[in-house]
Amino acid sequence: MYIAYHPSDAGYRDRLAAQLAATGMTVWFQPPAEYGTQWLTVIRRQIDTCGVFVVLMTQRAELSDWVDQQVAHALTAGVPIMPLLLERDWTFKRLSNAGHRTFTGVSPGMLPRRPYLDDLRTALGLPPLVPPSPEPPVLQPATVIALPPSRVDTGERPNPGWEDLHSPSARLVWSPGGETIAVAGNDGTTYFWDVAVGAVRVTIEQQEEISALAWTPDSASLVTGDVDGAVRVWDAATGRQRLHISEDRQTVNVAAWSCDGALLATAVGDRSTIRLWDAATGAAVTTLNAGRHDLVGVGVWSPIEPHLLAVQDARSLRLWDTNANTVRARVSPAGHYGLAWSPDGRYLATTLDEEIIIRDAATMTEQHVLIDRKAALRCVAWAPDGKRLATGGADCSVRIWQPPHPDPILVLDGHPAAVYTVSWSPDGRRLAASGGGWTPLIWDLPAEPPTPTPRLIAQTSD
């Protein structure tokens, strides 16, 4: 394996080389004293025969003619290239122009995690660090949430799943009281599906695609946000509009209630702010500024602290004290999609590429990292018992996890397309999921979860 780097990154290079060597990989790099020499006698031959070419991507590396020369030769030689992005939002133009847009980002100073190491080993013809785990039991759906035909095109895609990330989709959330499942999608319609009867009880029609959906803690109201910046609160019993808040004319990414139901948090489009509203009157309370370039994608209130809001963007995860308008904690990097509090407020689960990261909410330190190599993760939700997690993604399946066990204990199969949303029933005995294809499903879960199979995980140090 060949590592290309700028001399300023030599410290990180040494740590990375030690990590790779500790897992059985042979590493070569040019010593700093010889940097920029021996091109014809050593460097070209090393790149031609390296097996995998790793480049440490930083601004100073891209501006280096010497690093650029090495990258260019690796592209010409057809060597597998697996870049490591050390600085956020700084990818190499030469790689992008050559159609190579896949890279692995790492937190500042942190070494890559197991998925990257396994990919390196695979490219080198070595076995993965962890042997394949036994396949977990698979459950088929028990109930299809039957909805009227959508107003959008739901024709079949040639490759359902990965390409279906852009197909007509539905969002779904189970009411805290358990009586109703709200389903909304990009045709502008929201349905209140009666769980006991198994049929739609109330239909709400809007003009714009619904992009956010959340119940009040008492199940009395539902908030919807659409792609035109409209935030509306609806009566759960009648479907009548209680409140209308007009945001900027951009997609509503966040519409979430505080745990006491007193505040409503919203965030839209390419804005880096979170707005708080009085849930009873719709009056503006305050604005939280997430940072100039940090565009808010997900926001979830603590289930036990009415003034604690978790906010996630492409760069970081923040804990906002909304009473003091201050950031209590911040970690980076963060994913674009899933974010969930455990029911007792002790833990936060986030998804980042192939990882489900569970953090202690008090210290924001990582407690467990679960790895899913089969799906581009799109959502995560804690079970009411706080012991299980559900995730969904682009492979059309839902997986149930029981931390700290590293493997899923159940796979919920049968969804026709990518899964964007998973939602537990309040008693934790059923799980609903929706996404592409406009076909929400419900699975009945076993009273006793399967016992995880013990498995030894090889450890790598940061």
Image: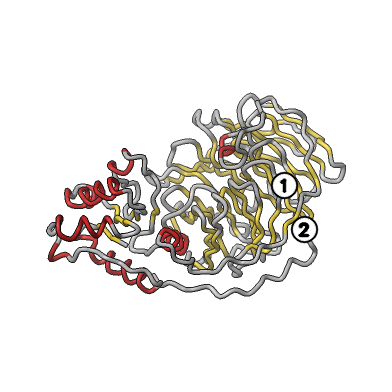
Q: Label 1, secondary structure: give it.
A: loop
Q: Which residue is mark 2?
A: 445
- Kindly indicate the quadrant of the structure image that contains residue 242: top right
Which one is in front in this view, the residue at disc 2 or the one at disc 1?
Answer: 1
Name the residue: 61% across, 27% down: 208
- Horizontal relation, residue 106 to residue 380: left or right: left
Give above or below for 95 relative to 87: above
Q: Which residue is mark 1?
A: 414
Q: What residue type is disc 2 on?
A: Leu
- Horizontal relation, residue 186 to residue 325: left or right: right
Name the residue: 49% across, 30% down: 248
Residue 68 place in picture, x, y as percent: 22, 48
Name the residue: 50% across, 50% down: 311
In terms of sequence position, does the residue under pointer 2 or pointer 1 come before the other? 1
Residue 51 place in picture, x, y as percent: 34, 59
Separation of marks 2 and 1 at Cα, in angstroms: 14 Å
Mark 1 Cα-neighbour bin, 10 Å: few <14, some 14–19, many ≥20: some
Which residue is nearer to you in this view: 187 or 281? 187
Residue 215 place in picture, x, y as percent: 68, 45
Which residue is nearer to you in this view: 42 or 433? 42
Give above or below for 148 relative to 460: above
Which residue is nearer to you in this view: 341 or 263? 341
Residue 178 place in picture, x, y as percent: 78, 50
- Kindly indicate the quadrant of the structure image that contains residue 109: bottom left
